[in-house]
Image (spheres, rainbow, N blue to C red):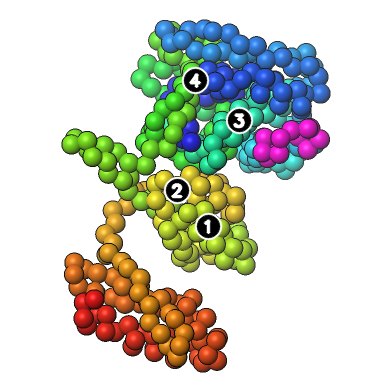
Amino acid sequence: MTIWIDASSGASGDMLLGALLGAGVPLEVLQGAVDAIAPEPVSLSVERVTRNGFAATRCHVEITDSVHHRSWRDIRDLLAAAPLDQAVRDLATRTFERLAVAEGAVHGSDPLDVHFHEVGALDAIADVVGVCAGFVHLGSRQARPASVVVSPVAVGSGTVRGAHGAMPVPPPAVAELLRGVPSYAGPPGAPAMELCTPTGAALLTTLATGWGPQPPMTTEAIGVGAGGRDPEGHANVLRLLVGAVSTGSTTEAGSTTEAPPLLIESNIDDLDPRVWPAVIAALLEAGASDAWLTPILMKKGRPAHTLSVLVAAAKAAEVRAAIFRNTSTIGLREQPLGKHALDREMVAVEVDGQRIAVKLARLGDEVVNAQPEYDDVARAAAALGRPVVDVLADAAAAARPFTKQGH
């Protein structure tokens, strides 16, 4: 499944809730998750509205809560104790942790002690948990995890008034949350106002497995979520497109061509190096064609590694998810690649009665390369009690006639 979030007019928690409802997520799924965490009654209601001529779904979060300042420590305890689906709990915890780290960076304080002010209010907690429950519900409808691609995020312009007084748009927390991902002031004619809230930014950056325009997909459901305001000349909405993965594109003649493979990379300087072999294995298990590390030196002289992963477009979502789950990175860069590969086939040779597979590479009718499979060589060497280097040399010699004869 592929989900594309069009945040070109902004993003907030209630806009995402409305878009999920419009895309077919049942209200009871969102309400059930909110009920599981809310210490006081919180009610979600749905309203059909228009925003600058666009029909949209508005989700109202109605509360009686009087506490407006909760720390990340408080919210973490609420999430840990709530009878939530584990996937929802994990996603919501990651969202609030991301928000706490951003707020801590902005104010120079420990993330655990950050008081979220407006974002700590119960309606914002309900926004985060409800949205996380909605995305988990969408992903659970398919055997494969959902790929969530987000457009460049419109943040707005001008000033906004918050708990610390008037602030420029984007507010410092939003700018910090969107560090390293595409954002801009907004479409031409957008009003001077805040278009992306801290809650919206935290949710988008937690949910996203990729950034950019709508990916190849067959759209099955569309949700349009409305913001609370309806400024003249600006559709204050967020769109959600849900559909099946499309791995190819159609040419003018009607034939299908495969989407190009992707190179996904990230510079990582804070991962225990003993973990890297397990990371590489997890990426290959998730569907990567290849994965490798390049030692680099980052700013301030910090040693680090560039993780590079080659993957077919159809497997990119699973590989992105595996990178985020198994490493400390919070962002990826990727690019499509052209690829030229020789035709290949497998044959077998024998060394002292041990069967060893050999990969042949062809350029037209000519066999230009013959390589014994190392795992087979190592197995044969162990069985024969011989050095690996000797068995490898014998296997290569046994494979040489294939290149001479053109097989």
Q: Residues within 10 Å of mark 3 (few under 14, many from 20)?
A: some
Quick check: 109 left or right of 40? left
Q: Quadrant of residue 401?
A: bottom left
Residue 152 makes an appearance in the image: no
| SS assignment at label 3 | helix
- Reading the image, the residue beneath label 2 is 315
The residues bearing labels 2 and 3 have C-alpha atoms spaced at a distance of: 21 Å
Instruction: Indicate the amino acid at tag 2.
Output: Lys
Q: Is residue 85 magenta?
A: yes
Task: Point out the tag, 1 or 3, that comes first from the N-terminus.
Answer: 3
Compared to residue 174, the image places residue 193 above or below, namely above
Q: Which mark is residue 380?
A: none
Magenta segment's dominant SS is helix
Q: Residue at x 78, y 38 (%)?
A: 80
- Reading the image, the residue beneath label 3 is 137
The answer to the question of whether label 1 and label 3 lie on touching residues, with beta carbons closer than 8 A, is no
Q: Residue at x 53, y 62 (%)?
A: 280
Q: Which mark is residue 223?
A: 4
Residue 248 makes an appearance in the image: yes
Q: Which mark is residue 285?
A: 1
The residues bearing labels 1 and 4 have C-alpha atoms spaced at a distance of: 34 Å
| Residue range (magenta) | 78-90
